[in-house]
């Protein structure tokens, strides 16, 4: 069993208090033991991050210095990609192939982007003043950043925040998820072993929301909180952070609709939405969870999804041929099953999947629900599991009404070969991230985020780095006299 320690001030720190364990969802075996970090551990990590920010001078380092450190970390992580990909497969059940190609390699690519970003931080000088006045806005690092992440991408989601925070000149405390403490610790091991970062610049805490998350969010020494996770937790964090006006960004849940119009390239669309819905058990915030389909295509779409979902390679996540493993935890499995039951109770019919025959294993085959109400709970709430609902529409207005009928606003997709129709629908989808004729393309260069119950702020791209900046306005007057000296003799300039 892996013994996960906290990482504070450049040291792996033993902990005398209570601990928790993570489990292999395929076998039930224990994977790791990690500390339930308390307020004292939180205080020690914040103090270390503060020292590194101020006395250690990380905030004043040149962009090129931070870039070099991030590039070194990227190389170290890349060299460990196979081992870390296997660890993620063991600790949360996401197939090793997905971890290699998307999670760890994706994180490496992001670190290299953020290295570049560290050298591109720009402010602005106002060009509309008299020439003797220099009026400008400077980017400065926000300070100590608490980075709270979920379990579904335990390395990549940490890097989205950590890379941006370090590029901006912040110091950071990463809080891992209680489901995947070892996977995120493997990233921080790469930080340590790279030798690229001075003590205290990067810290790691393990522990659940209570007491660890609460203590971190409440700590007055934390200047910026960046959270990815459920909407309920995001709301709680925002409420607590409001008491001291800490800067907050939130990447929360989603309920992704795909609008499939009558002129869609159906084969391509069915391939994409099947992967979108069921790859690693739908445990992704941008998993495709609702198909809103032109009624004329409805039966063909249902048939095509059923056929494809039956052939998706599901099994041991350590087998490189698999695309779907078990659900990450008993809690996640039970939640998904409860939504299947709810969907059936609401009047839907499972055309594939349905209530599992053997609930002792955490492998949950894809479920497709048809015929349920468009305003039912399973149609509007996030499941975070392999459950897809399909609704027919008669016209574009109805398609949009169904697609937008949820409190979330993370992402959606439009499937049409008519460019005008596709763009028309994309503009009217009330989400922050739209794919046209594709699914699961994400580039670090392009920022994304959520609206409504899906969150606040941006991640990735330069906008993602700006989330870790605090702007300073600086004004210099080079004239010989103070401009208000002759206040009563004329207007100030
Ligand atoms: P969660 O909200 O239960 O936990 C997320 C993290 O918050 C964990 O580290 C947890 O320990 C911590 N936490 C819990 N309570 C806290 C508190 N009171 N204060 C501070 N931290 C606290 O979510 P989860 O089950 O780990 O993750 C699944 C959710 O994440 C889904 O809703 C999914 O949509 C969302 N998600 C969103 C994105 C995105 O980019 N929008 C990406 C991935 C996952």
Image: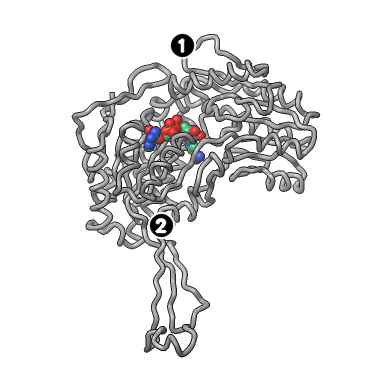
Tell me where residue 207 sits by quadrant: top left
Figure label count: 2
Closest to the observer, 96 or 421: 421
Please give the residue where the numbered disc 1 appears in the rendered image.
360
Task: Give the SS element for disc 2.
Answer: strand
Pick the quarter of the image with the N terminus.
top left
Marks 1/2 in contact by CB < 8 Å: the verdict is no
* Residue, far front: 488
Any part of residue 82 in sight? no
Q: Is residue 212 visible?
A: yes
Q: Which mark is residue 469?
A: 2
Q: Position of residue 144 (x, y in %)?
A: 32, 50
Q: Quadrant of residue 152?
A: top left
The kind of secondary structure element at disc 1 is loop
Label 2 residue near ligand 1, CB within 8 Å: no
12 shown above or below 330: below
């Amino acid at each position: 069993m892996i013994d996960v320690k906290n990482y504070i001030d450049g040291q792996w720190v033993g902990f005398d208090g209570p601990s928790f364990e993570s489990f292999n969802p395929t076998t039930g075996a224990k994977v790791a033991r990690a500390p339930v970090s308390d307020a004292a551990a939180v205080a020690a990590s914040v103090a270390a991050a503060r020292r590194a920010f101020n006395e250690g001078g990380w905030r004043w380092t040149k962009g090129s210095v931070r870039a070099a450190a991030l590039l070194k970390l990227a190389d170290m992580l890349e060299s460990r990609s196979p081992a870390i990909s296997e660890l993620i497969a063991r600790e949360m059940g996401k197939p090793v192939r997905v971890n290699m190609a998307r999670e760890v390699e994706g994180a490496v690519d992001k670190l290299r982007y953020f290295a570049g970003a560290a050298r591109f931080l720009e402010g602005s000088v106002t060009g509309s003043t008299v020439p003797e006045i220099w009026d400008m806005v400077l980017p400065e690092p926000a300070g100590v950043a608490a980075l709270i992440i979920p379990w579904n991408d335990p390395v990549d989601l940490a890097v989205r925040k950590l890379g941006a925070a370090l590029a901006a000149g912040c110091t950071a405390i990463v809080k891992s998820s209680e489901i995947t403490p070892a996977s995120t610790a493997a990233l921080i091991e790469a930080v340590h072993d790279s030798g690229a970062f001075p003590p205290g610049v990067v810290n790691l805490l393990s522990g659940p929301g209570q007491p660890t998350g609460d203590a971190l969010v409440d700590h007055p020494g934390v200047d910026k909180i960046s959270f990815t996770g459920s909407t309920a937790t995001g709301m709680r964090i925002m409420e607590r952070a409001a008491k001291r006006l800490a800067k907050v960004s939130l990447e929360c849940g989603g309920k992704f609709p795909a609008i499939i119009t009558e002129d869609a390239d159906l084969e391509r669309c069915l391939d994409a939405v099947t992967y979108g819905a069921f790859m690693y058990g739908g445990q992704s915030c941008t998993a495709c969870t609702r198909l809103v389909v032109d009624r004329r295509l409805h039966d063909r779409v249902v048939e095509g999804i059923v056929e494809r979902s039956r052939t998706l390679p599901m099994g041991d996540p350590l087998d490189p041929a698999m695309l779907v493993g078990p659900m990450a935890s008993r809690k996640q499995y039970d939640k998904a099953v409860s939504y299947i039951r709810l969907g059936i109770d609401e009047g839907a019919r499972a055309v594939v999947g349905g209530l599992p025959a053997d609930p002792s294993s955490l492998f949950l085959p894809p479920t497709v629900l048809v015929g349920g109400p468009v305003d039912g709970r399973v149609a509007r709430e996030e499941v975070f599991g392999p459950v897809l609902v399909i609704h027919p529409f008669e016209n574009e207005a109805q398609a949009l009404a169904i697609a937008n009928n949820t409190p979330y606003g993370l992402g959606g997709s439009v499937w049409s070969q008519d460019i005008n129709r596709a763009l028309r629908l994309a503009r009217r989808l009330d989400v922050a991230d739209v794919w046209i004729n594709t699914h699961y393309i994400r580039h670090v260069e392009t920022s994304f985020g959520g609206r409504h119950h899906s969150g606040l702020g941006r991640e990735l791209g330069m906008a993602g780095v700006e989330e870790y900046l605090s702007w300073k306005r600086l004004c210099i007057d080079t004239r010989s006299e103070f401009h208000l000296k002759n206040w009563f003799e004329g207007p100030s300039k």
